[in-house]
Structures are given as structure tokens and as C-alpha cells.
Image (cartoon, rainbow, N blue to C red):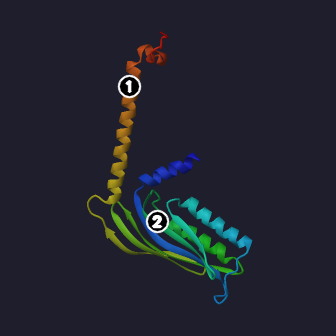
Amino acid sequence: MSNKYLQRLRDYVGGQRLTLSGEIIICSKQNTQLLQITANESKTVDKILNALQQQFPFLKLEKKTNVVEITVKLFAYKKFMADEQFLEHLRGALAAAVNSINESETLTARVTANGLLLNSNLQQKFIFLSKASMVEYKVTETISVTGLSEVTMHRLQVYSIAIVFTALIIYNLYVLYAYIPDHNPNKLLTKIVNI
């Protein structure tokens, strides 16, 4: 449980900012047929989505079931994260998801996504595409960032706030320690005498 909160804290202070929009489309292997999904296949899809959500908690996943297909929207807007190898990790997770769905006799899946990844010195535009069970990504544009990037400014703000709160806590502990008579907390409260 504490690892989950530590990871969220690392992501909040993280050295990269992600904007992503994409979808996983699950449909029948026969394109002319309506989507008929069994209970086991539905559980498999839900399990895959839960695994993706746990691995990438900053991504919003939205599942929509239509007559012909199931669409899972992937979305993140200016979300900070700490994963330096995010593109490769997302590629692996999406490939595992697509491969597991394509193992079904009746279902097939495909992925399309694009986005922007910004760190302290580079801005990268990327695209994800799938063919059969293979998912690949390509960085389509790389721009060097000069000066202070938004990621650096965000990290400076977070660290500044942490320093201020730490100083306030230390000051309050010092005041409590220095001004408690005999360091006995019971002497802080005056006794109410009945009149």
C-alpha cells in the first residue's frame, strides 16, 4: 500500500510531463460480424484494463461497448511522471494487452495513440500503432528545450513547498519543546477551578 503512495509521489514530482490520446479497439475477427463477447472474454478485457490502470495510474481509461466493437480510450493531459523509459514500458504493456486479446478465437485488437512527452531538455512527439499482435512506437519529432522548461519549474515549486512545510514543522516542534514548562504537556493546560 505504501509503495503505491510512494509511486504516486514520485510521479507527481516526476521529471517528465505526458499528454496522450489514443484507443484500443476490440472487435470480432470477422469484420462483417457483430461483436459477440463471452463472459470469460469480458473478464479478460477487464483484467487487462485493471493491469494497465495499476501500471499507469496517471492514465485515464474509459471503456465503451458498442454493437460492433469495444473501444478503450487512453487519455492523459499534462500529467507528470517519473518513469524515464515510459514509451518502452507503455509499448510492452499495450503489446501484452493486444496479444492476450488476439489469443481469443473470436476477438482481435488494435492500438492507435499519439502524444507529447516533455522533460527538462527535450520535447518528443510520438505515435503508437499496432499490426496483429505487434505494437510499436515511433518518435516523430524531437525539439530541444532551452531555458527553464515547465517540468523544471514544476519540480522547483514542489521542492520549494516541501522545504517551507518542513521548516514550519521544525519551527513548531522547537516552539513546543522550548516553551513547555518542564517538558510536561499536562502543564500547558490550566486547571479549571470550580467557583
Q: Which residue is mark 1?
A: 174
**Residue plotted at (61% across, 62% down):** 51
Q: In this rendering, does residue 133 appear at all? A: no
Q: Secondary structure at mark 1?
A: helix
Residue 78: image x %, image y %? Answer: 40, 63
Q: Which residue occupies 53% across, 61% down?
A: 56
- Left or right relative to 167: residue 136: right
Q: Position of residue 46 (x, y in %)?
A: 65, 67
Say above or below: 169 vs 94: above
Write down the quadrant of residue 151 in the picture.
bottom left
Front position in the image: 74 or 104: 74
Total marks drawn?
2
Measured as percent of width and height from the top left, residue 80 is found at 43, 58
Q: Is residue 62 visible?
A: yes
* Quarter holding residue 47: bottom right
Mark found first going from the N terminus, 2 or 1: 2
Q: Amino acid at mark 2?
A: Ala
Q: Residue furthest left?
A: 147
Q: Is residue 81 above or below residue 144?
A: above
Farthest residue to the top: give it: 195
Residue matched to label 2: 76
Question: Could you say whether the residue bearing mark 2 is in a helix, strand or loop?
Answer: strand
79 lies above or below 2: below
Tag 1: amino acid: Tyr
Q: Tell me if mark 2 has few (under 14), some (14-19) or many (20+) residues whose alpha carbon lies within 10 angstroms of its own.
A: some
Between the C-alphas of marks 2 and 1, the distance is 43 Å
Quadrant of the rendered image containing residue 165: top left
- Packing grade of label 1 (10 A; few <14, some 14-19, many >=20) is few
Front residue of this view, candidates 64 and 104: 64
Name the residue rendered at 35%, 72% in the picture. 142
